[in-house]
Image (spheres, grey):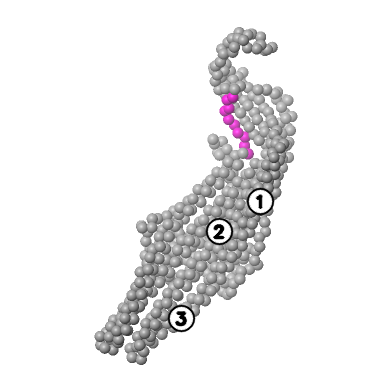
Amino acid sequence: MITPRPKRFLPLVAVFAGVLFVGCTVGPNYHRPAAAVPAKWDTTAPWREGTPMDAMAKGAWWTVYHDDELNALEQQAVEANQTLKISIARLEQARATAAVQVSTLFPTVGLQPDANHPVAERGRESGGRTLTSTTANSAAYTANSYAIPFQVNYELDIFGRRRRGIESAEASYQASAADLENVRLMVTAELAGDFFTLRQQDTEIGILNRTVDALTKGLQLVQSRHDGGVASGLDVAQEETFLDTAKTQAILLQQQRKQSEDAIAVLIGKPAPDFHLDPKEIGAAPPDIALGLPSDLLERRPDVAEAERQMAATNAQIGVAQAAYYPTFNLFGAAGFQTSAIGSLLSSSSIYWGLGANVAEQIFTGGARRAQVQYARAGYDADVANYRATVLNAFREVQDSVTGLIVLEGAQQAQQAAVDSARKTLDISTDRYKGGLVSYLDVVTAQQTLLSSEQQLATIRGQRLVTSVLLVKALGGGWDSASLSAVSVKAHLRDIVSP
């Protein structure tokens, strides 16, 4: 290796240091593209626009329902859900990828034996070798060689290729963090939806069981009147038919309930055969949820944040592709100890060193660089379209949930009135039947109407709770994209020096 004198090398160092400090970063700087945002939500009283999720705990949004059993299930899902564990592992992969990119900011140092400086060598020179001015003696000889060769390499990031790569990796890391929050939101929302569906089914089963009890008593009444010659066999048959039908519906609902129970078991990471929830009917109404302004939704939805971070990552890749048009500058150095006697290996006389630099530039690539830039730009355009589509879908989900809650609230009030009327009709029909004024068909018809009305009311109440969960999910579940600012990979000394 040629060993330049230090004084001759100083100008070379100055040149490259100057180039390093005036280096630029090629490629477009990232700015979040605009998306269509409505001025306000299409709502009616008592809905309002206020501070987004102002009554909702950050992360544990489900506590607004004040249901201890739901709170416990949600905590189990957060800790044991397998889909969440997959997303957590993907986040760690993204962090490691970003750390790999950050490591390129530093030089590589290694022990690199080569043909000129092996770690240890013993060889014999031929006596018939060609003589030069430095080899006057042509006698054959055998010699040992011992060396500890170190080599340092560093590529100057003059045009920002590595900086853009780090920018892209950091944005991808943040996108993975947002994806994790989106998965967590979907899992917890799905669990809450299944939980309230289960409670709706419990309510319907309770209605059917109470109906069976009432029909059993009614059948006893009709049977006694039949035995006394007052009622006909048709009256008994009609009541028996309706009773058996109600029992059948209750049995079939048990299957649906078990399916909901099994879905909850999977979400909380437990085997379905080992998981059971005691029956409990719906007791509470949906909580009040402040919507906030539509523009706030861009900061509250993790899927919107994920799409936005993906745009930032692909935007940086344009700079990486454009940097291929520019030359690369590399600094390298080698140093170590070399001697023929191992005892003097670490002495000052055994030291050798060398420094150098090179520049590389691709002259002809057959259009590959241009194609790579086009590919990166097309990827960015696709991510912009995906971001805007995600934003539009977010607005749709919120508006659909709000509209659904408004409609269901009115429907519940109307259906409650229908239940009250059906119950009154049944009481009147029963009294008139006992008085011999109507046939038992009128009573059976009133019983069927009441059952149908109560089942419909239970369905509406369950749908209101599930729709409220969908609204919370559509609003982001109390999450805020500001938390992504803490998601980054910093160069710590411990990580830099680790192998």
Closest to the observer: 243 or 13?
Answer: 243
Whole-percent x, y for residue 203 in the image: 40, 71
| Residue identified by numbered label 3 | 418
Comparing labels 2 and 3, the label whose residue is closer to the camera? 3
Per the rendering, the mark at residue 301 is none
Whole-percent x, y for residue 455 in the image: 42, 74
Q: In the rendered view, would you say 228 is above or below 131?
A: below
Q: Disc 3 or 1, which lies upstream in sequence?
A: 1
Circle 3 residues within 10 Å: few <14, some 14–19, many ≥20: some
Residue 457 shows in this picture: yes
Whole-percent x, y for residue 412 in the image: 48, 76
Q: What segment carries the magenta color?
A: 105-114
Whether the magenta-drawn stretch holds residue 88 is answered as no
Q: Disc 2 or 3, which lies upstream in sequence?
A: 3
What separation in Å lies between label 2 and label 3 (alpha carbons)?
40 Å
The quarter of the rendered structure image containing the N terminus is top right
What separation in Å lies between label 3 and label 1 (alpha carbons)?
58 Å
Per the rendering, the mark at residue 479 is 2
